[in-house]
Image: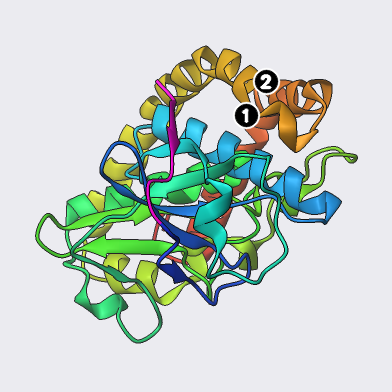
Amino acid sequence: MILYLHSIQDISVQYETGDLPVLVLCSDGQQYICKYMRPNATIAYKLACEFMGALFADAWRINTPPFSIIQIKPAHWASISTPHSYSAPAIGFRKIDGVIDITPTTYQQVKVGKQALYQLLKIALFDFWIANEDRTYNNANLLYQLETNTIISIDYGGILNNVSFDYPLTQLTETDSILCADIFAHISCHVTNEQLKDAVSHLQKDYQRCLIRAKEQTLQLANIPKEWNVPITKIQAKANELFSDKWIEDTWTNFVECLKQNSNYGR
């Protein structure tokens, strides 16, 4: 269920990352990292991608922060000079404590083993399926919870081939995948070839279950805020592409080929 919340105090933090998200305390007592409308037509489509990506990641049972639609009250924008829309709601991702960003300098803190391997493989396959071009070898867009050994997927503003709503989906290239990153090399080199094969075999079966659950969630796409002015017909067209038999089959083939190039899988 998608929650609809509102801010209850002034914005306390604005982050320096590309979309300049803000940290907001909301009516459920939780803090959310929010992305919001600005006077730029492409921003609305990025917000729609964030919505779609988070919705489907949750359906895949990938560890990802819960998201809500959040109305930030006009008075609570006082400390922020970035141009924004007072009327359009934001999309907010619940702030998770006790995590680190996975970067080229922190990835070795991830505990290696079958759990981390499967989590990363599943995130990689999800990225291939949803054409996420914003998680690459030098930009993991992953968090890591040390206490639970949990890899957490974030940031879906680059799905659908970097927000390409007017062109057909295209498969990711090798360098677009987390399978090319140091974090995957770190994990895969510490598991046996047999463990890797077992994980891929299990993932292939899980893939179909993930797609079934995701398709069941497509009705939720109608809840993308109308204030974003993204035509529902464009959203539905992209969903239809994602669930076409050819795209699903080509995604698995592409995933396996990339895996072979970056591990001992299939050798």
Q: State the residue position of label 1.
A: 248
Residue 218 horizontal side relative to residue 259, left or right: right
The three-letter amino acid code for the residue at tag 2 is Asp
User: Is disc 2 in contact with disc 1, using a CB cutoff of under 8 Å?
Assistant: yes
Q: How is the image coloured?
A: rainbow
Residue 114 horizontal side relative to residue 235, left or right: left
**Foreground: 83 or 204?**
83
The three-letter amino acid code for the residue at tag 1 is Ile
| Residue at image location 55% in from the left, 59% down from the top | 77
**Foreground: 151 or 38?**
38
Q: Position of residue 14 (x, y in %)?
A: 49, 70
Q: State the residue position of label 2.
A: 245
Residue stretch in magenta: 1-9
Q: Secondary structure at mark 2?
A: helix
Using the rendered view, name the quadrant where residue 213 is placed: top left
Q: How many marks?
A: 2
Q: Secondary structure at mark 1?
A: helix
**Foreground: 208 or 81?**
81
Q: Position of residue 7 (x, y in %)?
A: 43, 45
Q: Does the magenta-highlighted stretch encompass residue 264?
A: no
Q: CA–CA distance between discs 2 and 1? A: 5 Å
Q: Is residue 7 above or below residue 136?
A: above
Q: Residues within 10 Å of mark 1 (few under 14, many from 20)?
A: some
Do we see residue 171 in this rendering?
Answer: no
| Residue at image location 70% in from the left, 57% down from the top | 84
Q: Position of residue 258 (x, y in %)?
A: 56, 57
- Furthest-left residue in this view: 147
Q: Is residue 23 above or below residue 74?
A: below
| Residue at image location 85% in from the left, 37% down from the top | 168
